[in-house]
Image (cartoon, coloured by chain):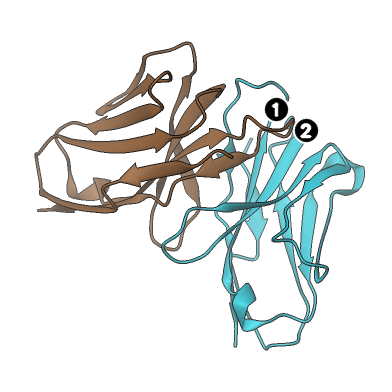
Chain colours: A cyan, B brown
Amino acid sequence: DTGVSQDPRHKITKRGQNVTFRCDPISEHNRLYWYRQTLGQGPEFLTYFQNEAQLEKSRLLSDRFSAERPKGSFSTLEIQRTEQGDSAMYLCASRPTGANYGYTFGSGTRLTVV
Amino acid sequence: KQEVTQIPAALSVPEGENLVLNCSFTDSAIYNLQWFRQDPGKGLTSLLLIQSSQREQTSGRLNASLDKSSGRSTLYIAASQPGDSATYLCAVPDPGGATNKLIFGTGTLLAVQP
């Protein structure tokens, strides 16, 4: 088990382009979360998957954002028509079912929109 | 709505000092509390997970306490080292929903001077 993997580590894109990030959770974890973190702030919740079902989306997740988790394994987060305000660290986390389990986070994807 | 506050926002100490980081939360109906470490530009590394039924949790030079009724947790770092320099974040699962999404504080930026 290599933990939670995120790809790419860094992404620089021009405003208006589409970007897609990938997260591979720990294999036995059925719960997967995406968070966004801007400089000097704590991570903020974006969306949650239980297996392949997307069960909650934050108000932060505008209609330019879409996330999927086909077959309940890896997940992708796509941002369409990127804006400079989308520049942030995008973090993925996974955990097993059960209230007492902690979260394991990936190394994040740093997005810079120029 | 759960809110998490961390004090101080930044802390600078000489090597070898013992130090305490503080975390407070507004809704005491939590399952657990998790402390994380974040190095600049990196993801989150879990340090300690303390369950609501526990008062303390220890790992090496780290000790986390939890006083659920007063909505407080502390992270004690003994004999600090320059390698401890990082941002420390505390987080609790949102008690208001079924997703257990984490609510984070804004972190304490720790600098340990050699």
Tell me the kind of residue under disc 2: Asn
Chain letter belonging to callout 1? A
- Left or right? Give the position of B30 relative to B77: right
Label 2 near label 1: C-beta < 8 Å? Answer: yes
Is label 2 in a helix, a strand or a loop?
loop
Where does label 1 land, which residue? A96
Work out whether residue B56 or residue B80 is closer to the camera in this orientation and state it. B56
Whether residue B83 sits left or right of residue B105 in the image: it is left
Answer yes or no: is residue B4 visible. yes
Residue lying furthest top: B53
Q: Quadrant of the C terminus of chain A?
A: bottom right
Where residue A59 appears, as percent x and y from the top left, is 73, 57
Lower sequence index among marks 1 and 2 = 2
Residue B89: tell me if it is visible.
no
Q: Position of residue B111 (x, y in %)?
A: 21, 54
Residue holding disc 2: A30
Question: In what quadrant of the picture does the N terminus of chain A appear?
Answer: top right
